[in-house]
Amino acid sequence: MANWKKIIGGLAAVGVIAAAGAGYWAYESLNTGRSSVADDAVQLSDFKSADQDAIKRGEYVMRTGDCMACHTEHGKSPFAGGYEFKTPFGTLLSSNITPDRETGIGRMTERDFFDAVRHGQGSKGFLYPAMTYTAYAKLSDQDMHDLWAYMSTVRPAANAVDENAGMNFPYNIRLAMAGWNMLFFDNSGFAADAAQSEAWNRGKYIVEGGGHCAACHSPRNPLGAEMASKYLQGGNLGEWFAPDITGNPHTGLGDVSNDHIVEYLKTGSNHLSIATGPMAEAVENSTQYLNDPDLQAIATYLKSIEGDQKAPPAPIPADEPAMMASALRYEVNCSACHGLQGEGIPSMIPAFAGNNAIVADDATNLIRAMLVGARAVATHDKPTGAGMPSFEWKMDDRQIAETLNYIRNTWGNAATPVKPEDVARMRATLKARENLAAQ
């Protein structure tokens, strides 16, 4: 009996310790104490900042955080929500963040706003990490105050949004995000590294905080959390792939100069690459507005990240029959724009030779471009956004795969093979039509 008492007592002690640990864990991930610096009396609809400097700084914070892109449905009022996020768990809609009292955030106080942006706790309950509070947690108090001042200048727009109506059960239960936060949310603010330069720390602050680069450029685990072990090594977004932006010299930015990174972020293109898809939206609404010192800081930080150090694959031999057939197919269909040597046209047509973005293991972007075409971003500095036609009607899945294998394994490139079934899956996902020969 004494032994049983000892066992039961031991189990009870373990249970108490586990409960205490879980309680502390929950407190750390759900605590909003940092928001105590914000006003909790005046609602946004009743507030109009008169501090022009704060408003200007707040607009810059908004640009850094790319708020407009995600909270604006195409053709609708800015910040009125309704933008779609397709996730493995269902479809989310971005919320209305204008000062409208009934359908926006007009009833929020500054503290409510801090709670939502930095801690993921909004007026309707816990937010989903598609609203990247997981990154915005790093924003400083000053940046948050300034952002609040800017939001007071936004025109109210009535637009009711049921953000999680398209989420599958049980992911449509907001309370479940409390558990997700306990598992994956780092609720701490930004901490500078005293051993690094001011520019490096500024770059880290933007990349990890407002810029929320990892939200797209890091892969996610089955529960939708970013995988820290593969930080910024590329992430699949379903119909797009956000490439490796670490210092990896094969698939990342290791051999791209700081100035060329700055040019890409500022103008949407450089000597090798052209922004399209989600990155075009980021450049159009966010990075083209950032000042050059901040862009240089971003480049400095990104290139310092070691990334995946695995050796690149061996290229597919040029004398393989499929490669030889694809060389002719490339010359006929692609070389007029991309060049016989894959040189492209700087700031207009992407180059293939020496372009690390095209040799990623995930060829989603290239397959998509071949099937449905692509449109480059138009920016203030480079207002002409070139387009690429679709080849869905002209090539079957095998021909597209072989053409991409030629591009990814010629001119010094080396990449894993694209398979016809990869193209077939993307054709079905995009609802692209079959080529004419199959019809």
Image (spheres, rainbow, N blue to C red):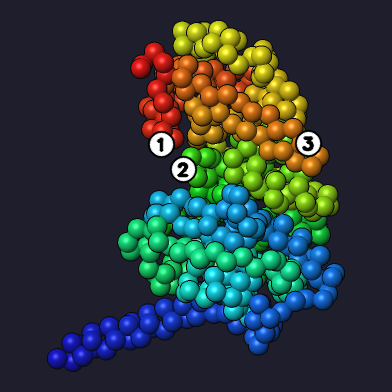
Q: CA distance from mark 2 to mark 1?
A: 9 Å
- Which residue is painted at 40% across and 51% down in the image? 88
Q: Amino acid at mark 1?
A: Thr
Q: Where is residue 106, by image quadrant?
A: bottom right
Q: Which residue in the structure is indicated by mark 2?
A: 238
Residue 91 in the image, given as x and y percentages of width and height: 43, 54
Which is in the foreground here, disc 3 or disc 2? Answer: 3
Residue 86 in the image, given as x and y percentages of width and height: 46, 50
Q: Earlier in the sequence, mark 2 or mark 1?
A: 2
Identify which residue, 403 or 160, lies in the foreground. Answer: 160
Q: Which residue in the structure is indicated by mark 1?
A: 429
Q: Which residue in the structure is indicated by mark 3?
A: 382
Q: Is residue 30 above or below residue 280?
A: below
**Mark 2 and 1 residues: CB-CB less than 8 Å, in contact?**
yes
- Left or right position of 394 against 271: left
Q: Earlier in the sequence, mark 1 or mark 3?
A: 3
- Which residue is painted at 33% across and 64% down in the image? 170
Q: CA distance from mark 3 to mark 2?
A: 29 Å
Identify which residue, 119 or 45, lies in the foreground. Answer: 45
Total marks shown come to: 3
Q: Amino acid at mark 3?
A: Lys
- Which residue is painted at 71% across and 52% down in the image? 286
- Which residue is painted at 66% across and 77% down in the image? 44
Identify which residue, 173 or 142, lies in the foreground. Answer: 173
**Quarter occupied by the N terminus:** bottom left
Residue 153 in the image, given as x and y percentages of width and height: 74, 69
Q: Is residue 324 above or below residue 228?
A: above
